[in-house]
Image (cartoon, rainbow, N blue to C red):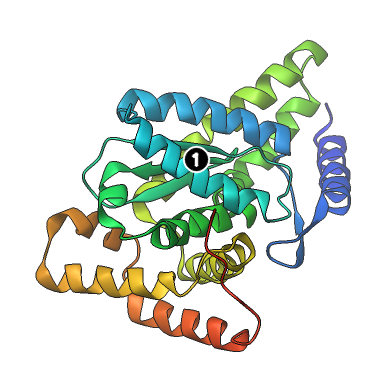
Amino acid sequence: MDPRYGLLAITLALTFMISSCATYNAATGRRELMFISPEQETSIGRNLNQDIITKMRLSRDPEYNTRVRRVGEKIVHSIDTRGIEYKFRVVEDENMNAFTIPGGYVYATTGLLNGVSSDDELAAVLAHEIGHSEARHAVKHLEAAMGYNTVLMLAYILDSREEDKKKDQWAYIQAGGTAVFQLIDLGYSRKDEYEADRLSTVYMRDAGYDPRAILTLMRKLKEKERQGEPHWAYFLRSHPYLDERMEAVRSELAYGVNAPVFRRPE
């Protein structure tokens, strides 16, 4: 292929992608570009889930699993999701933690279930992770990590044999899962955390949980941090600015202080 035509084809393809993939995201209230489709996200999540369950032991405790599914599904059923089917899992880990990966997989540790004092506090954590998922934070980081190579891959696909295109695209998309694992390990940006906190107050209120539990949980985290308890340190490592987040949550709750009449979960 003549390089000039290849560059033109890439430019036209990217222009089409940008114009056609801008989709309104109800969670963020913005129109956002989507290079990874919901189907691709589901495939990525399915593959990452297989990696996770080989590295972390799934809990077989029926009480833990039932509780996480009950609280998580109550939140999901009360909001207008973006069409992802959520799957809630409990993993054996004494650290107090929770995380989500693309495709609607949400994981809570046994340490988290032992550490929360109520379903409201558990809902605060799960709603936060669902907020990350609905805002597509992990997917956006994955798309950003793939950005430069996407152009190179597109050029390759344009010059590939037809029967190789789909296979190459899927192999490339799935290979990007490494970026998601790095995100889980290092934590989200401040902007992402603030956005997930804001969404969690809305999701908890809509599901009938008390969003003030976000503050009680954060105060508990600060106290555990002060006491130097190691099993809480992992959760705090990705959330190192609790004072600022607590202030933002207080502002969010104050803004809608007259709105909620908190209903106890069934």
Across and down, in percent, residue 151 comes to 69, 41
Q: Is residue 119 above or below residue 5?
A: below
* Quadrant showing the N terminus: top right
Three-letter amino acid code of the residue under disc 1: Arg
The residue that mark 1 highlights is: 69
Q: Is residue 99 above or below residue 189?
A: above
Residue furthest top in the image: 163
Q: Is residue 86 above or below residue 30?
A: above
- Report the side of 1 relative to 196 (left or right): right
Between residue 29 and residue 157, name the one nearer to us.
Answer: 29
Q: Is residue 60 above or below residue 239?
A: above
- Report the side of 35 relative to 183 (left or right): right
Across and down, in percent, residue 164 comes to 73, 14
Identified at 27% across, 35% down, the residue is 92
Local secondary structure at mark 1 = helix
Across and down, in percent, residue 169 comes to 68, 26
- Report the side of 157 relative to 260 (left or right): right
- Report the side of 202 relative to 113 (left or right): right
